[in-house]
Image (tube, grey):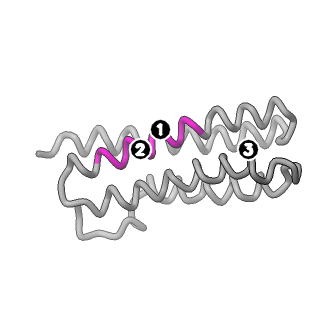
Amino acid sequence: MSSQSYHDLIVWKEAHQFVIDIYLATNKFPTEEKYGITSQLRRAAVSVPTNIVEGYAKRTCRDCLRYFDIARGSIKECAYLLELSKDLQYVSLDEYNKLANQRTKTDYLINRFMSSASDYP
């Protein structure tokens, strides 16, 4: 969509930070969750900036929005997995709130980007 790098996108920066925060948090999850919640949460989180990068590289607004929509689905998946992790006491309430705030901010930025991008032909 642009000649700028995806590194310049605030939405990508926030999504990237969210992934880092998720990895740090899931390092403390029980080892029996390695192939369960830990893996699922990490994959969903990584999907967000990955789809932002792929969408941003597309030549048409329609293609871009399709990938951003996938990112939006992944960030919603993270919302549930974080809630489950809190309920299972894999993360403290403070850590949950920090991650949930970062997730909410990223979700908001994805929606804002999609709204502004859909204004273009």
Give coordinates of residue 41: x percent, y percent: 66, 47
Is disc 1 surrounded by few (<14), some (14 to 19) or many (20+) residues within 10 Å? some
Pick whichever of labels 2 and 3 is earlier in the sequence: 3
Seen at 24% across and 45% down, the residue is: 117
- Check disc 3: other Cα within 10 Å, few if <14, some if 14-19, many if 20+: some
Q: Secondary structure at mark 1?
A: helix
Residue shown at the point (42%, 67%) measured from the top left: 7
Magenta stretch mostly in which secondary structure? helix
Q: Nearer the viewer, mark 3 or mark 1?
A: 3
Quarter of the picture containing the N terminus is: bottom left
Q: Label 1 vs label 2: CA separation?
A: 5 Å
Stretch of the chain drawn in magenta: 65-77
Is residue 86 covered in magenta? no
Q: Is residue 13 above or below residue 92?
A: below
Q: Which mark is residue 37?
A: 3
Q: Position of residue 104 (x, y in %)?
A: 56, 37
Please give left or right for residue 13 compared with residue 45 in the image.
left
Helix, strand or loop at label 3? It is: helix
Q: Which residue is mark 1?
A: 73
Residues at marks 3 and 1, CA–CA distance in whole angstroms: 17 Å
Q: Which residue is mark 2?
A: 70
Query: Do the numbered discs 1 and 2 sit on residues whose CB atoms are within 8 Å?
Result: yes
Q: Secondary structure at mark 2?
A: helix
